Image (tube, grey):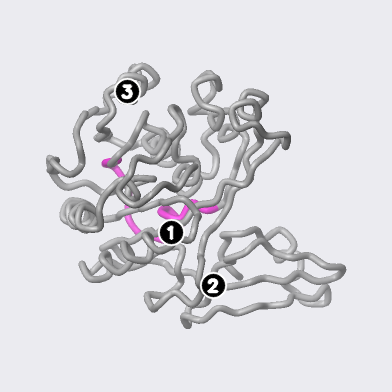
Amino acid sequence: MCDGQEGSPVPRHSLLDRCPLTAILKPEISHVLRGHPTSCCPHAGAARRTAPRTAAVDRHVDGAVTTHLDLGGGTGAAAWAALARWPGLGAVEIVERRAAAVGLGQQLAAGNRWRWTTADLRHWSPPGPVDLVTIGYVLSELTVEARAALIHTAVRCAQTVVVVEPGTPRGHHRILAVRELLIEHGFRIAAPCPHAGPCPVDWCHFATRLPRTELHRLLKDGTRNFEDEKFAYVVATSRPIRPPQARVIARPVRPKNRVVLDLCTSTGAAERVVVPKSNAGYRAARITTWGDTWP
């Protein structure tokens, strides 16, 4: 993903242009994407084989999700992820300004009764209330005023809002601004933060490792067979939440006989914890990854 200048278009992939958003909504979506040609998007094949463990909406928000609205939804990646997470999902609407993306998404989703709307989010109003609104990789395309208006629209119609941005310092700051807006509107922060206070770090982001196809390496002029997709996100809701005690905010370090975890805690502080092999939590720490809750 690329992080462009404020208010400028950001290059996005065609098929699965929100891999981190997919990871947040559903750990495994292989059965949904199976059969979709990776030639449409280098990330598509990677996402089929990637199983992040941060299903934040289902883990931290009480209540069922039966309706979903994806704003700036591209070809419908978030809708596929939501459907995989909640098979009983009913009404789904994807709003996207690019007609070509909508056309491709409709072809891929043939048979699904999804509503596709070609519209500019700056001049669009929601048709009614929904359980979940997702906004992925959209904010950098909007002015500060337009972002605030979009969040206002989202909280007026949704019980839960998920916003994802590139995991750059700018993306982090955009997420912080959105987080404040969501709190001002009375929403509770469900993830990733285990608290509603100021962020204790300068740059909070997460990453999921994605295998690269040969085509992906060619398009990106790369040699490695993987890449770390960095992203920042917030999940906020008007529903009851189940906040974690702490979240791992950096890749764990595993020197011999111990694990070092950098945490954001429910007290609002950043904390480094060393879990020695003699500790009862050592086995759990060994399999804990960046973005997981702790303990």
Q: Position of residue 170 (x, y in %)?
A: 43, 59
Residue 112's disc number:
3
Q: Position of residue 60 (x, y in %)?
A: 42, 61
Of residues 170 and 163, which is closer to you in this image? 170
Q: CA distance from mark 3 to mark 2?
A: 38 Å
Stretch in magenta: 54-70
Q: Residues within 10 Å of mark 2 (few under 14, many from 20)?
A: many
Q: Which of the marked residues, 1 or 3, is nearer the chain's N terminus?
A: 3
Q: Which of the marked residues, 3 or 2, is nearer the chain's N terminus?
A: 3
Residue at 27% of width from left, 23% of height from top? 99
Mark 1 = which residue? 170
* Amino acid of disc 3: Asn
Of residues 156 and 229, which is closer to you in this image? 229
Mark 2 = which residue? 246
* Amino acid of disc 1: Arg
Q: Is residue 70 above or below residue 131?
A: above
- On screen, residue 206 versus residue 25, left or right, reads right
Q: Position of residue 274 (x, y in %)?
A: 73, 77
- Closer to the camera: disc 1 or disc 3? 1
